[in-house]
Amino acid sequence: MAAQSPSPDPDFPFRAWYGNIQYLLNISAAGAASCVLLFLLVKLRYDHRRFPGPSALAAKLLAVYHATPAQIALHCGADAAQFLIVERASFFVLLVVSLIALFASFPLNLSGSVPLADPFARTTISHIHDGSPILWLHFLLAAIIVAVSHLGISRMEDDLRITRFRDGNGNPSDPNSSSIAIFTMMVQGIPRSLASNKAPLEEYLQHRYPGKVYRVVVPFDLCTLEYLTSRWTKLQNEISWLEARMDSQSMLNEEDNDGHESSQIYEHPLLRKAKEMWATLAVKLGFTEEERLRKLHNLKLVLQNKLLDYKEGRAQGSGIAFVVFKDVYTANKAVRDLRSERSRRSIGQFVSVMELQLGRSRWRVERAPPAVDIYWNHLGLSKLSLRLRKVAVNTCLLLMLLFFSSPLAVINAMSSAARIINAEAVDHAHTWLTWLEGSSWFGALILQFLPNVLIFVSLYIVIPSALSYLSKFECHLTVSGEQRSAMLKMVCFFLVNLILLRAMVESSLENAILRMGRCYLDGEDCKQIEQYISASFLSRSCLDTLAFLITSTFLGISFDLLAPVPWMKNILKKFRKNDMVQLVPEQIVENTVEQNDEVGNLRMPLVSEREGSLDLHDLEVHDLSVYPINRSFHTPKQTFDFAQYYAFNLTIFALTMIYSLFAPLVVPVGAIYFGYRYMVDKYNFLFVYRARGFPAGNDGKLMDRVLCIMHFCVVLFLLSMLFFFSIRGDSTKLQAILTLGLLFVYKMLPSRSDAGRPSLLEGIQTVDSFVDGPTDYEVFSNTDFNWDIYESQS
């Protein structure tokens, strides 16, 4: 019998759409080549003040290639080093997964026998019959991928230790760490009156840990102080402006009385009577400028009394205390003791009078974040205000996820509104788009390429900006807390748009919920879930993901290679300056720093290779003279949005993992994405976003959230395989059961967390050995209002 030729899938309505993937590849490659040429011909000259020769260019790029994470941490800060370590680890994990997918899963998918007309669909798992024995090999490959991912993430946790001054148990990761935070405990929920008299708190802690408490810092309500100082400045300006205006009006009235007495004779009596009545009414209602000036002076007296409370130490506190201990062991012990006591405390248990006065039952104890990581102007915000802000933000986020989660949902909403207004115009526009798609290859190219660009721009620029603003509105206590909140919101949005809705081929989460509700709540006879695993549906979802990965890899990263935003900002600043401005000493110092950096710092690897990537003890001092390690009290502003790029990278990692066995061709594109981005971001950190003053270590809380999400990406991969095996696996559902067991095994695997090292704790220096003068917490919490100017204006 002759072999049956493959026939098209009857549920395959979009075969013409598949042919346009070659145009997407061509235009993405052309865009990437254009960006690289622009970088080589224009951007390099701008970054290095002159166009380097071939040898100098090769030396600089080799220096970027050989720069280790430890050197990145010293020169660009711990955040940059952690970001690059995550990208490098993601690249190696996906590189191994791509080898597994191409050399094992790809041939298995091609060996399937489901008749499919499209070549790409035959490379997916849809080409394999339901219940085929080949699917057991896919289960084995899924187990191998999980093992590779776990080993890669565990190795990444080890590499991240060099960028953390404190491990998960509170012990210092680096014996040379000079952060006061490793000795400090933060207590929230203390009475606000302790700021003016902290003696009871000091007495209580000295009684609990005699001789081990170095210093107790109880900041004032700095949020209210910031409001009072800004209000004081505005009030002074308003009073000065009003007094000047009243003086000018009195002078004009005197001139009018002297030179224009004759003109007053001919003024109409009704007009003069109306003016007199308005003047009388304004005096009675208090609308005169004299009355307004009196009210402003009274308000000034009120502000003066409130500011005087801060100056004399009578103001309310922020409800937070920072306790600095003399050694790390006592700091960790205090955190554990106070936490465990609160959890073990039972109702009716005896409590001392001192603990009642200190509000011990309301304490929330944790290891203190670095002083430079704290938003000090947020200290003092009430819990009610913070909760209302979070409720408002989460409500807005939920509404956005339901109704405006993707640009396609917004376009559909606008189309529906336009149809209500003018249905004929909308039908005419749809007819024109249909004609454009079928008229020529150019029209098909535009309609194929434009949706991916629209999604890319909205997810890359619009949504991250909105979510970053919402996270700032929540007024977090620390910068890392704000970054974690923004990253989690962005990851939720990206996962809903790029994974859930893309897999379901829906425009919004609302439509998906309504469609599922019609199937299972209204009693309709439909197989909605089974539809998502059908050959045509799964193939389209895989190709949709591949198209987005191609656009993100070749166009998105190439666009980031140019770093256009800081580039354009610096060009605009240069145009705004004149020749006299260039003579300002600060500008000359800045240019000298940049020239010194360009001439001598990155011609060769930043540290010789024999020193190793983890040895930071023998660094030469002159290598860091331009970019010192110690952080100044004036915290520089970070221009790189770590939360946005973490969220986008994690979404790409999740997409690649989920589709690794469904569509093996997706995985190499994901690996190329992380490899390409790793080199581009390393160059940008060293030459574009590089700034002085960032610490070489942090508490790693943002990293903990990133690691948690990466583990969740592996869980999503297992859930997708579980979903597939439960629908199209063997009839006994044994594959689905084993996949569920594999999921539980993965969740039970121990993570390679940092453990306490007794030898390090025995040799650690005490806080007295490197603290000279006030601690960072005292300096930052100091009320730095200019009291001399205040007293001169009062």
Image (cartoon, rainbow, N blue to C red):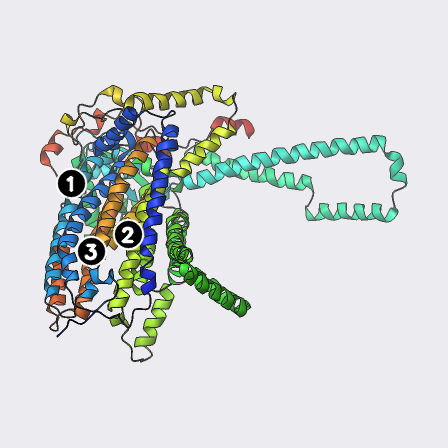
Q: In which quadrant will I find the C terminus?
A: top right
Res 663 seen here:
yes
On screen, 281 above or below 375? below
Residue pointed to by mark 3: 664
Mark toward the start of the polypeptide (1 vs 2): 1
**Would you call the spot at circle 1 few (<14 residues within 10 Å), some (14-19), or many (20 or more)?**
few
In this rendering, the label closer to the viewer, 2 or 3: 3
**What secondary structure is marked by label 2?**
helix
The residue nearer to you, when weighing 413 against 191, is 413
Which label is found at residue 651? 2
Q: Which residue is mark 1?
A: 158
Circle nearer the viewer, 1 or 2 = 2
Label 3 to label 1, Cα distance in Å?
A: 29 Å
Screen quadrant of the N terminus:
bottom left
Query: Is residue 413 left or right of 503 when viewed as pictured?
Result: right
Return the residue nearer the eye: 371 or 218: 371
